[in-house]
């Protein structure tokens, strides 16, 4: 058996090595080892996508799936049911305060109206009002909180504004603004009044979180490399504090629903009590709590309370799962 030839560098002296023709070497002097997949560097996992991982975690959460389905059903039904129908018809549908039946699923209300139609009309109005209040609160809270936390030169200014707004009870401040507009209780005026104070809580949370993260090593490195403040906030800070922002923002929707009920109870709701065409969940509760008929007919109170509590709970659970999924610590 012929021994395989190997090239031995020690067999060459310095002079022979210098005169060696490297372009015309005898290939029989070398042994081809071949590729070694076990030893070679390679990517052993699929490329990582943060948002893909977020949606993957949410899709595996039964709480988020059930909440999303229920929320979709409620929004769809509120958008398309009882359109063009007055909340309180001119001619009653039957005897007042009648219990639920096959013909009237939620029963008959105080004025002989079908509570099924009235509840969905009120839910539609309340969801629109809630979306406006919550959207303004979140946008203002994020913008003001980011400026307040990152730029220290505005610290005293925002502290004094916050102190002034928190010294005055929110309800009194809202009523003062309504009276300054001549007692106008339209949706625009009430939304403006609430927006003046709604940002304080969220912006304070964002400020604290930015103060805790803005002096970390990667933010200092980004600043040294020439990144501007807005870019550092958008790229470095916001993704890290986004779960806390989302979880805090989930309370904006239940809070807006409670504001609607509170203003309606004091007679300052955006739905006039003299109209029969519109209603909100707050105005429905106000009508019931101003009398004692609900004690004899509990379904009058159970249905709107269940809607207010159910919608608030669904938004909170969906938002909590979303916030937990956004937490970078839960990803690889």
Image (cartoon, rainbow, N blue to C red):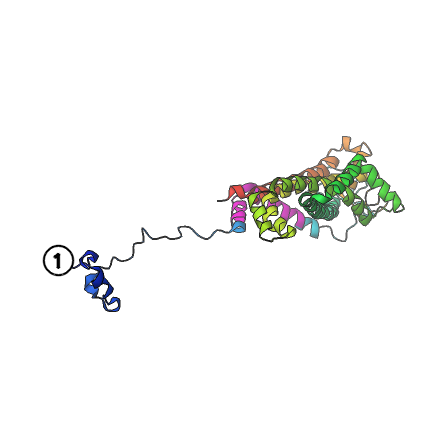
Image side of residue 210 versus residue 281, left or right:
left
**x then y, percent, for residue 82:** 73, 50
Camera-side residue: 107 or 194? Answer: 194
Q: Which of the two residues, 57 or 289, is positioned nearer the viewer here?
A: 57
Instruction: Find numbered disc 1 in the image and state the secondary structure of the residue it sits on.
Output: loop
**Overall secondary structure of the magenta stretch?**
helix
User: x and y percent of residue 100 in the render?
Assistant: 71, 39
Residue 282 can be seen, yes or no: yes
Q: Quadrant of residue 259?
A: top right
Where 83 falls versus 168 (above or below)? below
Residue furthest left as drawn: 1
* Residue range corresponding to the magenta coloring: 53-75
Q: Which residue is mark 1?
A: 3
Q: Residues within 10 Å of mark 1 (few under 14, many from 20)?
A: few
Q: Residue sitting at 85 percent across and 43 percent down?
A: 177
Q: How many marks?
A: 1
- Give the x, y percent position of residue 56: 51, 48
């Amino acid at each position: 058996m012929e021994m395989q030839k190997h090239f031995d560098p020690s067999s060459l002296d310095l002079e022979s090595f210098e005169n060696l023709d490297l372009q015309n070497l005898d290939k029989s002097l070398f042994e081809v080892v071949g590729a070694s997949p076990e030893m070679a560097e390679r990517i052993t996992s699929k490329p990582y996508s943060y948002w893909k991982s977020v949606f993957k975690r949410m899709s595996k959460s039964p709480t988020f799936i059930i909440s999303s389905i229920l929320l979709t059903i409620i929004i769809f039904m509120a958008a398309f049911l009882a359109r063009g129908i007055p909340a309180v018809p001119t001619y009653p549908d039957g005897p007042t305060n009648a219990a639920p039946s096959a013909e009237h699923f939620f029963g008959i209300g105080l004025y002989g109206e079908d509570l099924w139609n009235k509840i969905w009309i009120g839910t539609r109005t309340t969801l629109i009002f809630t979306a406006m209040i919550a959207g303004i609160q979140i946008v203002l809270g994020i913008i003001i909180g980011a400026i307040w936390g990152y730029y220290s030169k505005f610290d005293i200014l925002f502290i004094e504004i916050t102190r002034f707004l928190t010294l005055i009870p929110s309800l009194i401040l809202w009523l003062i603004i309504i009276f300054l507009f001549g007692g106008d209780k339209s949706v625009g005026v009430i939304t403006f009044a609430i927006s003046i104070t709604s940002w304080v809580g969220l912006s304070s949370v964002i400020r604290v979180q930015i103060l805790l993260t803005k002096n970390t090593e990667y933010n200092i490195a980004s600043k040294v490399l020439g990144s501007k403040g807005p870019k550092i906030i958008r790229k470095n800070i916001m993704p890290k504090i986004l779960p806390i922002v989302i979880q805090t923002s989930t309370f904006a929707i239940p809070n807006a629903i409670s504001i609607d009920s509170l203003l309606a109870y004091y007679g300052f709701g955006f739905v006039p009590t003299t109209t029969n065409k519109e209603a909100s969940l707050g105005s429905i509760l106000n009508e019931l709590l101003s009398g004692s008929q609900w004690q004899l007919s509990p379904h009058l109170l159970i249905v709107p309370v269940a809607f207010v509590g159910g919608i608030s709970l669904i938004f909170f659970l969906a938002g909590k799962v979303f916030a937990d999924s956004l937490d970078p610590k839960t990803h690889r």
